[in-house]
Image (tube, rainbow, N blue to C red):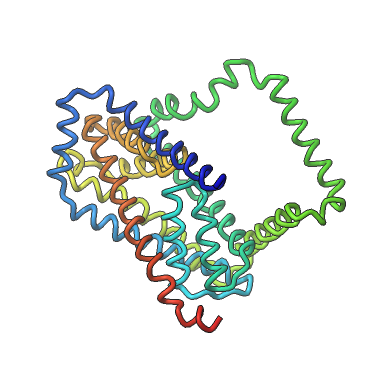
Amino acid sequence: MKNKLGTILKLSFFLGLGFFFIWLFVRNLTSAQINEILISFKRANYWWLFLSMLIGVTSHAVRAARWKMLMEPLGYTPRFINVFFAVFIGYLANLALPRLGEVSRCGVLTRYEKIPFNKSFGTVIAERALDMVVFLVIFFVTILMQFAELKDYLYARIIEPLFGKVYLSGGPSYITWGIILLMLGFFVMLYLLRKRFYHINIVMKIRDMLVGFLDGMKSLIHLRRPVTFAFYTILIWVCYYLMSYLVFFSLSETSHLSPLAGLAVLVFGSVGIMVVQGGIGVYQAIVAETLVLYGVTSTIGYAMGWLMWSAQNLMILVVGLVSLALLPLFNRNRINNG
């Protein structure tokens, strides 16, 4: 009962946060502007959204193939179809609760491919770390290529909120340094007394997860086909880019935008998805603010943000539910024989 209540509270919190950001943007719109957004939805060319969704499915299929490669150095060769289903079920779970997706997709492989949970979870962490590095590279390349257009937005929305308070107050306080030192001391104490805690169940689970993480990081080093792995990584991010950029062509007001505008929407929109679960509310506002820099009105930009967000999440919802239904059917013989 407590677990169900906790899940409901978490889901309500993130949905509430998303609706708060929607309200924050919409409250300043006039009835004419709201009507303009609704009209944009009606006259949008939805074939471009459908194409964006197909590319989204392709990106996740490539992600499944890349994840499968990460498990090969560990001695596991799961079937591609199961890995594909697991990836989509993971994204479907993430629509409900943050980080639930990583647990869900690893759980699928544990059940249907007999891969230890800590091993597959370690490869997921390694994969996420790699994607974060790639994202940071794309982020800084985008800033360098469009510094004149993006510098004011970058300072007002990212640099100042993150670092302004620290430097304006003269640096970290003694309390901050005290907390940092206490945390370091705590971890040092745990390390020195580690043998006394080894028999505790939760400590053993943490150790298993750490071992799985290290194995996942090692799999990056011992890849059997590193060139193919690098190609898959590039292809995933190219697909992510096209998922956003192609939607520009669904509205006449945004069809003229340059590929660099699509790159800016990709990086800033990704930040919105990281900040709020699923990006609901904040993603649309960020897309609107970003497109204003390229001469698009905020109302059209907001409509574009909703079109992009809806296409991406509808794709996850549909294919995720189909994956959930087909997974046991494709593994019927394995379950019966197991």
Q: Is the residue 31 above or below the residue 122 in the image?
A: above
Is 191 left, or right, of 57 in this rendering? right
Q: Quadrant of residue 280?
A: top left
In the rendered image, the vertical position of residue 322 relative to residue 160, given as above or below: below
Position of residue 200 relative to residue 112, above or below, is above
Residue 333, placed above or below residue 175? below
The percent position of residue 85, horizontal first and vertical second, equals 43, 66
**Which residue is painted at 43% across and 67% down in the image?**
84
Q: What percent of the width, then of the height, locates residue 104?
A: 51, 58
Q: Evaluate whether residue 316 shows in this view.
A: yes
| Tally of marks | 0
Residue at 55% over, 73% down: 113
Quadrant hosting residue 315: bottom left
x, y percentage for residue 29? 23, 24
Report the side of 150 relative to 125 (left or right).
left
110 vs 178, nearest the viewer: 110
| Quadrant of image for the C terminus | bottom right
Residue at image coords 46%, 73%: 80
| Residue 144 in sight here | no
Residue 108 place in picture, x, y as percent: 51, 66
Q: Is residue 291 left or right of residue 168?
A: left
**Looking at this rendering, what residue extends furthest in the front direction?**
1
Q: Residue at x 71, y 21 (%)?
A: 175
